[in-house]
Amino acid sequence: MGPNQQSPPGSTPSKPPTSASTAANNTLLLFQRFHRPRPERFSTCIIGHHPDLLGSGGAKTSQHKIKTQIQYDPLGFKLSAFNQHYKSIQNYAVKAVTVPSSESESEASNSNNIVDSVKNFMAVLYQFIYPYAFYGQATATISASLVAVEKLSDISPLFFIGLLQAVLPHCFVALYVNGVNQLFDFEIDKINKPYLPLAAGKLSFRTCAFIVALSAILGLGFNLMIGSPPLIWNFVLCVTLWTCYSVNLPFLRWKQNPVLASLLMFVTFAYIFPVTYFLHMQTFVFKRPVVFTRSLIVSLLFMSIYITGLTLAKDIPDVEGDIKHGIVSFAARLGQKKVFWICVFLFEMAFGVAFLAGASSSSHFGIKIVTCLGNIVLGSILLYQTKYVDVTNPASTRSFYSFIWKVILLLNIVSI
C-alpha cells in the first residue's frame, strides 16, 4: 500500500514498510523478474508474505516468512531451473545413446565378424586334416619329385611348376582320406580322439560330409585340368583304396582286418605316392623315358621298411576304442608294448638301410658324409625319444606317432 493511500474503513492502519521489508520486496521482485517462477509459486509468495494482505498481528510473522522465503526461494528457483535443464540434457543423452551406429561402424563390425569366422573355420579345418600326417605326406611328395632330378639344371621354374601340380591336388586327396575316415569313425573317435573337430562338435556331420565331397571333386578336377596320367592314377587309386578302408558297407571297412589295413597303408605310402610322383616329374614334366634310377630304388626300400613301422604305430594309441567297436588291430592282438618295440626296430632298420645306401653310393664324398651322419643322428634321436614314451598312455604314444611323421621329411631327403 502506497504512503498516500488511506486505509479502508473499519480496518486497522498498517505500519509503514520498514527498510528491511522494502529490501525484501525489491529482492523478491528481482528474483521474480529473472527466474520467472511458475504462477502457482508466484501467487503463493504474494498471498503468504505481502504485508498489505496480512493483519497487524502477523506482521512480524510475515517479515520472518519473507526473510525465510528470500533466503530459500532463490535456491529453489535455481534448483528448479537446474533440474529442468538437467532433465533435458539427460533425455537428449538417452536419445543420443539409442541412435543407431553409423554405416562405417556397422561395416567395420561386419568385416571383423567375417574375418573372425574365417579364422575360426581355418583353425578347425587345420585340425580336421591331421596336420602331422598332412606334412608327412606333402614332404613325401616333394621327396619323390626330387628323385627325378638328375642334374642341378633340373631345379628350374619348370621343376617348381611340376611340383606345384603334384602338391596341390594331393592336398585335396589328403583332406578326403582323413575326412572320410573321421565320418565313419565318429563313435570311435569320441573315445580315441575326442579332440578332433567332428568328435568334439566343432563341425557338424553335414559340414564334414560337404568338405569330403568337395575335396574329392576338386582333387579330380585339378588332376584332369593338369592332364598328367600318373597324377590321375594316383587320385583314383588313393580315393578308391581309402574309401574301402573307411566306409562301413558290405565287403568294405577294411580297417577291421589288421592285415588288410596294414597292407593298404603300406602300398599307399611306400609305392603309390613315390612312384606316381616320380613318374609325373620324369615323364610329364621333364619328358624323359621311364627309368627306375638307383635313388628311386633306395627310396622305395627305405619307405617300405619305415612305413611298415608307421602302420603298426598308428594303432597303438587307439586300442581302447578299437576293441570296444570290434576292430582287432595288431596292437590290440599282440599288446601295445610289443608292437611299440617292433616299430622302433623297423625305424632303426630303415636308418641302417639308408646309411648303407649313402655309404656305397657314387656321390661326392661330402654328400656321403652328410647322408651317413644324417641317418646316424636321426636314428639316435628317435631311439632317445623312446625313453619318454609310456605305451599305456594314449597321449604319450600319440605324441610319438606325431613325432615320427614330423621327421619323415628329413628321412626322405637323407635317403635320396
Image (spheres, rainbow, N blue to C red):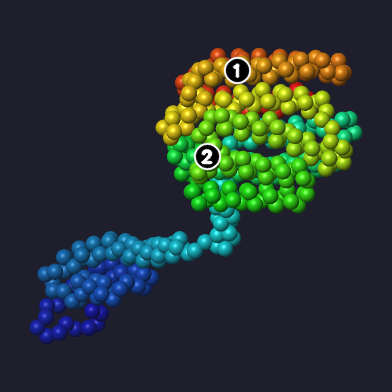
- Residue at the location (50% across, 17% down)? 337
Q: Nearer the N terminus, badge 2 or badge 1?
A: 2
**Label 2 sits on residue:** 253
The quarter of the image holding the N terminus is bottom left
- Residue at the location (41% across, 32% down)? 324
One can see residue 41 in this view: yes
Identified by mark 1, the residue type is Val
Which is closer to the viewer, label 2 or label 1?
2
Q: Is residue 121 left or right of residue 359?
A: left
Number of marks in picture: 2
**Label 1 sits on residue:** 344
Identify which residue, 173 or 118, lies in the foreground. 173
Identified by mark 2, the residue type is Arg
- Residue at the location (53% across, 41% down)? 252
The quarter of the image holding the C terminus is top right
Q: Is residue 229 above or below residue 327?
A: below
Badge 2 local density, few (<14 within 10 Å), some, or many (20+)?
some
Q: Position of residue 42 (x, y in %)?
A: 27, 73
One can see residue 168 in this view: no
